[in-house]
Image (cartoon, grey):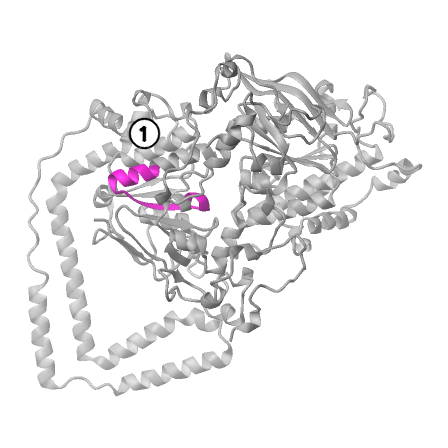
Amino acid sequence: MVDLQKHFPITRSLADQLSRRPAKVIHAVDGVSLTVGPGETLGLIGESGSGKTTLGWMLARLHEPTSGSIVFDGVDVTHLRSTSLRTWRRNVQIVFQDPVGSLDPRLRVWQIVGEPIRAQNMADRWLAVNGPRLARRAHRLALRQERERLTREFRAAMNPKAADRARLRREYRAQADAREKLPPEEQRRLENDYQAALQRADQLAAPLAPERDRLQTEYRAAMKRGIGPAPVVPKRPKPPVLHREAVRKKVQEVLPTVGLPVDCLDQYPHEFSGGGRQRLSLARALSVSPRLIVLDEPTSALDVAVQAQILNRLVELQRSRGLAYVLITHNVAAVRFVADRVAVMYLGRIVEHGPVRELLERPVHPYTKALLAAVPVPDPSRRHTRYRIGGDIPSLVDLPPGCRFAPRCPFVIDRCKVEDPPLLPMAGTDRLVACHRADEVADIRPESLLASDTPSPGEAPAVPPTSAA
Amino acid sequence: MTDPVIDVRNLTITYTVGAGTFYAVSDVSVKIFPRQVVGIVGETGCGKSTLAQAIPRLLPEPPATIGGGEIIFRGTDLVKVPKRQLPMVRGTGIGMIFQEPLNSLNPAYRVFDQIAESIRIRHYREMGWVRSFQGGEAPFDYSKPAAPITVGGSLTKSIIPDGAVEEAARDRLRTRSEFRDEVLEYLRLVRINDPETILNLYPHELSGGMRQRIMIAMALSEKPSLLIADEPTSALDVTIQAQVLTLMKELIEEVDAAILFISHDLGVIAETADEIGVMYAGRIVEYGPVADVFRSPRHPYTKALLKAAPSRYKSEGPLDSIAGSVPNLSRPPPGCRFHPRCPLVRDVCRGEHPPLAPVDKSADPEAPGLHRSACYFAEEVPGLP
């Protein structure tokens, strides 16, 4: 069973590593939580710069999350390193957007598709020898963390005053940036609250002697107990090296599953058409029988007819193998066909999340509506329309306070500009929506964001902005 | 009846690469009248970009060769114009908007200089300072200074009043600041907020949608009679694409130019074009008013293409795709090029390529605005599943 959870409650930053200025950070993905079950497809849609690709790369552990965790099959894989990361990669594979750039032009088909097979083989061989050592090290590390935790708790229990003061100080400092943006009177109020809380902390009394003795005995016992004995991992025999012929044989088995002929083993990627190259990428991902495939814009470089072939193939494979997909794309049509659930991303946040049919037919969040209304429809009778949502995406470095879509939103009210709406379940639906006015705007059709051919400039949106308290 | 701005007749273009010859465009005819928008739609490799670049003769020759046909632009066959005169057609005569705005803008130029350059070129050409392309049969004499352009046979649209040349002498020293107002005017035309700030930015500082608007402003500032937009929105996000398309639709009404709009996206073409041509393997297989073609396609390929756009959910069965693959253009199949993939194929299809004939047999075959299909069995297409 694949049970995947990802949490990025705080900020993910790419820029601070480059610029070494912690003050400026690109909030590429900011507090996103998702799950994907086996045999299920999660669609991630959003404009470029919404963080959907960063999220996909984090899932495949090509980016290290700044914070948060990725749980795969009940195991936290967020901080896997070296060979344990490499062996884990057989579970999650990725198909990249650019089928030309992601295939080495100097390698032949069997080398490209066989590369993950060989890499996994090498990792297996290494692990067979070094497994026991790794297990001992992991145990040592866990023991140390457990003991540190015990000590922290023991000290806090012995001296609640200092522990509480330290906690308050930590929290107050963490909010420093947010406080600066508030009006001065609000800042003063928070400062006073902080001082009062500190004084309350001073009132906390240390435990009395019998209690202290009990705590100390418990602490010593727990330290001694630790986390039990180290697991015994026997040394396994090294699996044999997969040589050329063995790899070619395995590749030959994979190729028909994506609809490529088996006799193309010795061809180069440039000999394939766009669709053929995308099939090759897919074959490479499938070669190690993963359980989750991250599809990063798998069809955006392809024509409609070829796109239909690839999408059909993806669905077929999912049915026959129980694969889970994370489909990252801005192509709403592809998401409609492949996904079971959809998450709409805007500026690093999920703004709406729900079952595919429900979400596409009755979008709630204004951004989802705008996105769906903007998709050109091959129907000339719908052409006399004017697109109403203007503006460009704000910078990910200096994010506006409040809702991130507020500067472009036609339904914006004052509250949206100061208070960031949380992603909350919507009553009566399987939907999560991050909008203050979700209930009011839910019934507005996306088409109503397109004005008719007789435009009246500055025309009021369907819900007057004043109607909300 | 006005004359068409551009009249492409039976154009054939081949690429010679190594030992092989690729028939990229075969026997294509397109006529565009003033203020008309013609869309060309087709898959990758069907020759639509080759066609777009062949019209202002931007194709590198070799490897490309114009094998036959005529490109009649305002009365002159561009195929016969000598290479050194071709730059005169481009910009003021035929403007281009390319797919990748970042690759088509000069990264070392500020927005102001990008647009001012176009305006300066047009200005000089109007004044007759720079040798401007002259249509008609008159050969161009490079040994003499260029004469001011006369109205008859001229490709530039402005009419030069008497004494304009003398007056233009003062304009030789026109300074940057004097171009500024005109540049700002074009930036406002393409709906750029705060154009004074944008003027001083470099292309990399702009978003994709902004860059594409700068490209459009550059193309429009030369006041071309024909604007060729080659996938102008393919590199943009859907919401930005919607903005740029809305802008283009508004500009079509404001600017007096004919537009050739190339795209692989049926939705984009449906929103912009008056007439569309569907290309397959280098040939136009169907041509007609946009509403007719979308509502009742009369070529099996158009029908299949319209059906292939994914519009259903996973639970509703697989998507319709077109069986087989696009033919190799170095060895195009004999007869109708779609026949190996066609559900209606019969023996006659393997013989000769069907002509692009009006669907309505009783109509005058020369009349413009007819729905035409290159299929022997066009009447049977509506009955296809």
Q: Position of residue A403 (x, y in %)?
A: 48, 64
For residue B225, side relative to residue A289 (left or right): right
Q: Secondary structure at mark 1?
A: helix
Q: Total number of numbered labels?
A: 1
Q: What residue appears at the point 54 percent right and 23 percent down from the top-left corner? A: B377
Q: Which residue is mark 1?
A: A112
Question: Residue A265 placed where, x, y %?
Answer: 31, 22
Which of the 4 quarters of the picture holds residue B162? top right
Is residue A101 among the parts visible in the rendering? no
Task: Give the magenta part as a residue range.
Answer: A314-334
Classify residue B91 by image quadrant: top right
CA neighbours of label 1 inside 10 A, class few (<14), some (14 to 19), many (20+): many
Chain label for disc 1: A
Q: Is residue B106 left or right of residue B171?
A: left
Give the answer, above or below, for where A20 lies relative to B310. Answer: below
Extreme residue toward the right, this view:
B162
Quarter holding residue B117? top right
Question: In the image, what residue type sits under mark 1?
Answer: Ile
Residue A127 seen in the figure: yes
The reply to whether the magenta stretch includes residue A316 is yes
Residue B349, x across and y down, in percent = 51, 17
Relative to the observer, which residue lies in front, A329 or B372? B372
Q: Report whether B72 appears left or right of A257.
A: right
Residue A33 magenta: no
